[in-house]
Image (spheres, rainbow, N blue to C red):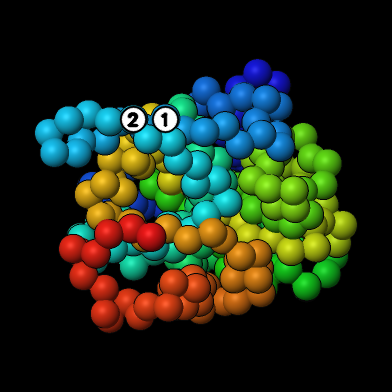
Amino acid sequence: MSRYHGGFTWGRAVACSSQSCHEVQLQDHDAHRLLGVKPEANSYLFQDGVIVMQSINLTDHFLIAMPGLEDSFFARTLTYICEHSERGALGLVVNRPTDLSVENLLLQLGMFPKGTASSNLPVLLGGPVQIDSGFVLHEPVGSWKFTLSSNESIGLTSSADILQAVADCEGPKRMLIALGYSGWAAGQLEQELAQNAWLTVPAESQILFELSSEERLPAAMKLLGIDFCNLSSEVGHA
């Protein structure tokens, strides 16, 4: 595979809630090259009117939306960054459930679940890009057709073989399924950080896979020792 796979396709589209969504199509990720590799992302930021270069890698981090994003798709969201490099960033919003269950998704894809362990989980709206395509964030990484590793234990898979395994009760031990993803062009995320659009904190798998959608954002903020009600759009990122 020479390019990042675009996700298993699902026939039903979920409408984006804002026209200010990120519309970046990250189609030039080489998943084989990226497996186990976290290249530094070079970003250009303005400081006192001078362009300076910084290096930052937010792979395997949470992004917490600041109040300044209240009118955008990302209002009050928690996003897990699956990959961040000089080409841009790719992530999934992990606290925005849809009214679709994993069981119903499998059935609509012609797959018949043999168990109920994962079938009652809600499908998430992972972002405004390719919202008719699905992505599975899971632990452990395993061996699937199209998988990008965020760390040694967490992978993002965009091929339908993992869904068939879930239907057959042979899927990953822990997982989230999302429609759509969130994407940033080269340097775009760094610019948004400089504008205090996000707080960042290293991700914890327990928050991803053991808490409900509603509990994830407060738990991530607790890692920083802050409460959303006390946030101001003037606060810098962590």
The residue that appears at 42% across and 58% down in the rendered structure is 200
Q: Is residue 6 above or below residue 15?
A: above
**Residue 15: where, in percent of width, then height?**
36, 52
Q: How crowded is the residue under tag 2: few (<14 C-alpha within 10 Å), some, or many (20+)?
A: few
Amino acid on which the number 1 mark rests in the picture = Asn
190 or 163: nearer the eye?
A: 190
Callout 1 secondary element? strand
In the figure, is residue 81 to the left or right of 52? right
Disc 2 to disc 1: CB gap under 8 Å: yes
- Residue 24 visible somewhere in the drawing: no
Amino acid on which the number 2 mark rests in the picture = Met
Total numbered labels: 2
**Residue 17: where, in percent of width, then height?**
30, 56
Marks 2 and 1, Cα distance to the nearest angstrom? 7 Å
In the figure, is residue 145 to the left or right of 31? right
Q: How crowded is the residue under tag 1: few (<14 C-alpha within 10 Å), some, or many (20+)?
A: some
User: Which image quarter is the C terminus in?
Assistant: bottom left
Callout 2 secondary element? strand
146 or 227: nearer the eye?
A: 227
Sequence-first tag of 2 and 1: 1
Q: Which mark is residue 30?
A: none
Q: Quadrant of residue 144?
A: top right
The residue that appears at 69% across and 60% down in the rendered structure is 175
- In the rendered image, the residue lying farthest to the left is 49
The residue that appears at 67% across and 25% down in the rendered structure is 33
**Residue 196: where, in percent of width, then height?**
25, 55
Q: Which residue is mark 2?
A: 53
- In the rendered image, the residue lying farthest to the top is 2
- Residue 4 visible somewhere in the drawing: yes
Q: Which residue is mark 1?
A: 42
Query: Closer to the observer: label 2 or label 1?
Result: 2
92 or 194: nearer the eye?
A: 194
